[in-house]
Image (spheres, rainbow, N blue to C red):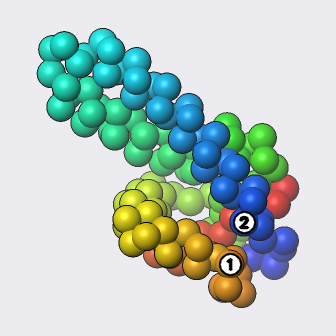
């Protein structure tokens, strides 16, 4: 069942992805500086874990990462409610697959009637304008 509202377009979603990416890159750079001399793999692994926690936390608590809030978009399930932890984790994991598949999973929203990416479909989520 689709949310009966305005779906977010490509550019607000892209810009929020870029902004969140910059935020997470800064965090990962700091971790790399602090932990790089001790164990570079630890810094990379911890950075990835923090990125997953960042997204799952915001998706399940407010439906908006800081960048999504800035772009006035929100992630909801088919009933217009916040995602629970399970679908949020699935969405984050499938987003990785969407990216490594030449970005096709992200671009899917351009021709999908509900503007869903592969990771939206996997998690039963929709990105809406607020």
Asked which quadrant contains residue 95, the reply is bottom left
Can you identify the residue that label 2 sits on? 10
Q: Secondary structure at mark 2?
A: helix
Q: CA distance from mark 1 to mark 2?
A: 7 Å
Tell me the quarter of the image containing the C terminus: bottom right
Q: Quadrant of residue 7?
A: bottom right
| Image height of 79 relative to 81, above or below | below
In the image, residue 21 lies at what x, y percent?
Answer: 54, 41
Residue 110 numbered mark, or none: 1
User: Residue 48: image x %, image y %?
Assistant: 34, 40
**Residue 87 visible:** no
Q: Is residue 37 left or right of residue 77?
A: left
Q: As drawn, which residue projects farthest toward the left?
A: 39
Identify the residue at image location x=47%, y=32%: 25
Q: Residue at x 67, y 85 (%)?
A: 111
Look at the numbered disc 1 and give the secondary structure of its residue. Answer: helix
Q: Is residue 112 above or below residue 94?
A: below
């Amino acid at each position: 069942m689709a949310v009966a509202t305005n779906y977010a377009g490509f550019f607000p979603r892209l810009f929020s992805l870029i902004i969140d990416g910059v935020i997470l890159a800064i965090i990962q750079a700091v971790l790399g500086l602090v932990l790089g001399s001790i164990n570079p793999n630890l810094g990379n692994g911890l950075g990835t874990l923090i990125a997953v926690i960042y997204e799952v936390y915001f998706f399940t608590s407010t439906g908006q990462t800081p960048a999504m809030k800035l772009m006035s978009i929100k992630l909801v399930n088919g009933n217009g409610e916040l995602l629970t932890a399970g679908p949020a984790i699935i969405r984050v994991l499938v987003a990785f697959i969407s990216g490594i598949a030449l970005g096709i999973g992200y671009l899917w929203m351009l021709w999908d009637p509900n503007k869903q990416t592969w990771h939206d479909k996997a998690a039963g989520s929709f990105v809406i304008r607020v």
